[in-house]
Amino acid sequence: MRNLKFLVITLGLALTVAACGAPPKADIDAGKTAMDAAVAAGAGEYAAASMKAVEDAQAALDAELKAQEGNWFKSYTKAKELAAAVKTAGEKAAADAAAGKETAKNEATAAIADAKTLLTDAQALLAKAPKGKGTAADIEAMKTDLTTAGTAITEAETALGAGKFLDAKAKAESAKKTAETVKTAVEAAMAAKKR
């Protein structure tokens, strides 16, 4: 009888210990740290696909932890694996963000240089534009467009200096498009004048 009591108490303690298994806190924290590093590195902006993978891995981990909360016999083996997946995905996203930033920086720098060249060319061409009856308003509008393009280039350079590479590239591309439009219009007017 005494052995039976001891066996029941031992079995009860074993069940209690098994039911109270703890989540792998160190692994979960390591995954969260890697995810936070990816966010800080700008993965959402410069490596969106990699950041989505981190978020998906975190969602899977959260779902597994929630599922284990409802279980009497908790097993955190899968949660440990999922936490490692979050960590790996977070580290990859941070590395991809750094590479994406560098690419965006290079593209923005090139776009600004191209925009400056196009702006200079368009301004020079506009100075030689045929002037005649009815062209003054058109020329004035094109000068305003080129001033706007120049402002966009300045804003692009400011954004580049602030590390906002995607914004810098977008502003430079806008300036390029405006300068190209003016250049094309002036070239068309010059060609028509020669006829």
Image (tube, rainbow, N blue to C red):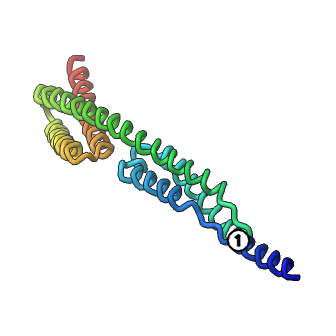
What x and y, as percent, mark residue 36? 41, 55
Report whether 7 appears left or right of 54: right
172 relative to 70, above or below = above
Q: Residues within 10 Å of mark 1 (few under 14, many from 20)?
A: some
- Between 124 and 66, the one lying in front of the other is 66
The residue at 16%/26% (across/down) is 125
Residue pictured at 55% horizontal, 56% vertical: 58
Q: Position of residue 53 (x, y in %)?
A: 54, 48
Direction from residue 157 to residue 84 in the image, left or right: right
In the image, taking residue 120 as reference, residue 99 lies left or right, namely right
Q: Tell me the quadrant of the picture where the N terminus can be found.
A: bottom right
Q: Using the rendered view, name the quadrant where residue 135 is placed.
A: top left
Residue at the spot of label 1:
19
Which of 6/168 is in front?
6
Residue at the outermost top position: 195
Q: Would you place residue 172 above or below residue 125 in this image?
A: below
* Residue farthest along the right direction in this orientation: 1
Residue 62 at x, y percent in the picture: 59, 62
Q: Image quadrant of residue 79? A: bottom right
Which residue is rendered at x = 20% and y = 41% of the image?
153
**x%, y% of residue 138?**
19, 39
Badge 1 marks a residue whose secondary structure is helix
Under mark 1, the amino acid is: Ala
